[in-house]
Image (cartoon, helix red, strand yellow):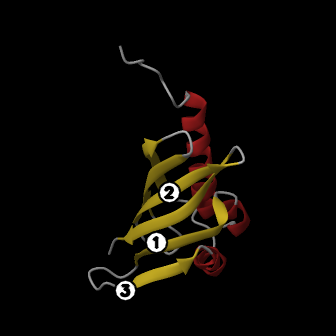
Amino acid sequence: MTANLKTVPTTEYNSVIEAANKYTEGLRTGSPNMVAQAFHKNAVMYGFISPPKPDMLAGPIDNLYTFIRDNGSAPAIKTRNDILAITQTTAVVRIDMEGDASGADYTDFLTLIKVDGKWQAIAKVFHKYQ
């Protein structure tokens, strides 16, 4: 008989969402420092910024911090964070976002890893809507 075990405690789901919330709350308040708490220092980001023309933004997560410094806060931003997958050490979160600091809407996918008991995003892949 195969064991029917729950391998990921509910507290881990909550911790993953807390990390994603640091990102979205940092966008709301215009705080690159708060956003940085959600990301590993070596995180990367990739995505399309000018659909339908495929202008890809690719590189270090510092590009995101520069965007926040240049564009400021987004007090009216609307976000929804959903965990798409989770294991004991990895997770993928989809963030639906409307009205960032530049007025744009996005879908972000954060890939997180648990290192030394802390969940941090190691990659952000995004799509900007027209």
Mark 2 surroundings within 10 Å by alpha-carbon count, few (fewer than 14), some (14 through 19), many (20 or more): many
Mark 3 or 2: the one toward you: 2
Q: Position of residue 108 (x, y in %)?
A: 44, 62
Please identify the quarter of the rendering in which residue 56 is found: bottom left
Q: Distance from label 2 to label 1 (Cα)?
A: 25 Å
Query: Which residue is outermost to the top?
Result: 1
Q: Position of residue 47 (x, y in %)?
A: 42, 74
Which numbered disc covers residue 116? Answer: none
Q: Amino acid at mark 3?
A: Asp
Q: Earlier in the sequence, mark 2 or mark 1?
A: 1
Q: Amino acid at mark 2?
A: Thr
Is there CB contact under 8 Å for labels 2 and 1? no
Q: Distance from label 3 to label 1 (Cα)?
A: 18 Å
Q: Is residue 120 above or below residue 61?
A: above
Task: Give the camera-side residue of 95 and 15.
Answer: 15
Secondary element at image label 1: loop
Residue at the (73%, 65%) spot, across then down: 33
* In this picture, residue 95 sits left or right of residue 40: left
Q: Which residue is mark 1?
A: 103
Residue at the (31%, 84%) spot, across then down: 54
Q: Which residue is mark 2?
A: 111
Q: Position of residue 21 (x, y in %)?
A: 59, 50
Quarter of the C terminus within the rendering = bottom left
Please identify the quarter of the rendering in which residue 44 is found: bottom right
Residue at the (52%, 31%) spot, across then down: 8
Secondary element at image label 2: strand
Q: Is residue 29 visible?
A: no
Q: Which residue is mark 3?
A: 55
